[in-house]
Amino acid sequence: EGLSNNSLQSTINRHKKSIEIINYLLKINELTIINNNSNLLDVGSGDGSFVKFLNSKNIKSNGCDINDADLEKDYLPFESSSFSHVILYAVIEHIKNTEHLLSEIKRVLMKNGTLILITPNFRFCYDTFYDDPTHVKPFTDKSIYHLLKIMNFEKISVKPWTSNLFKII
């Protein structure tokens, strides 16, 4: 039982750190941070623990994973213009039809909503990227920028993602 409590605490700590980093990056880019006024969608939500964590902090959140929709071809099961923030955390590298997925994300984002997209940078993980057999499409900072530009996203900012990059006080 102690191990499961440690595992739960580790997951909570990881989610806290993720929100701290995301909000820091949103703030320095003069974008709306994730807070109690947000309505967030976690696309590729997996076990749903991130959504549960956010909801426990009174941040309205929904998740969508492969059991809810085929991200390659289905419509996301949400109304248009429903979300202030959409998080795509370690998902896009698993998707062949990225254009469809990004179109659906644009559809469910509110006007002036924010997409937070986190993916491995192939420049730095080319020797291990395909060790995960579900990875189908590698991206670099430049290719993500250009893909988002092609898909008509605005105010695109590509930053490195690492919890070791800085300490948030």
Image (cartoon, grey):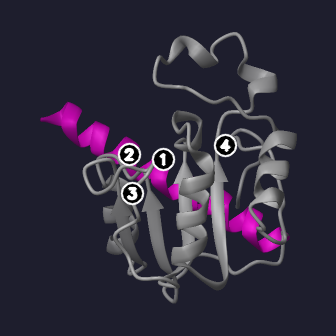
User: Distance from label 1 to label 4 (Cα)?
Assistant: 9 Å
Q: Residue at x 61, y 59 (%)?
A: 102
Residue 157: quadrant of the picture: bottom right
* x and y, in percent, of residue 56 in the image: 32, 72
Disc 3 versus disc 2: nearer the observer? 3
Q: Earlier in the sequence, mark 3 or mark 1?
A: 1
User: Distance from label 3 to label 1 (Cα)?
Assistant: 30 Å
Is disc 1 placed on a helix, strand or loop? helix
Residue 163 is tagged as 4
> Does the segment drawn in magenta span residue 19?
yes
Q: Is residue 128 left or right of residue 132?
A: right
Q: Which residues are magenta?
A: 1-28
* x and y, in percent, of residue 140 in the image: 80, 35
Amino acid bearing label 2: Thr
Count up the numbered dots. 4
Is disc 4 placed on a helix, strand or loop? loop
**Mark 2 = which residue?**
11
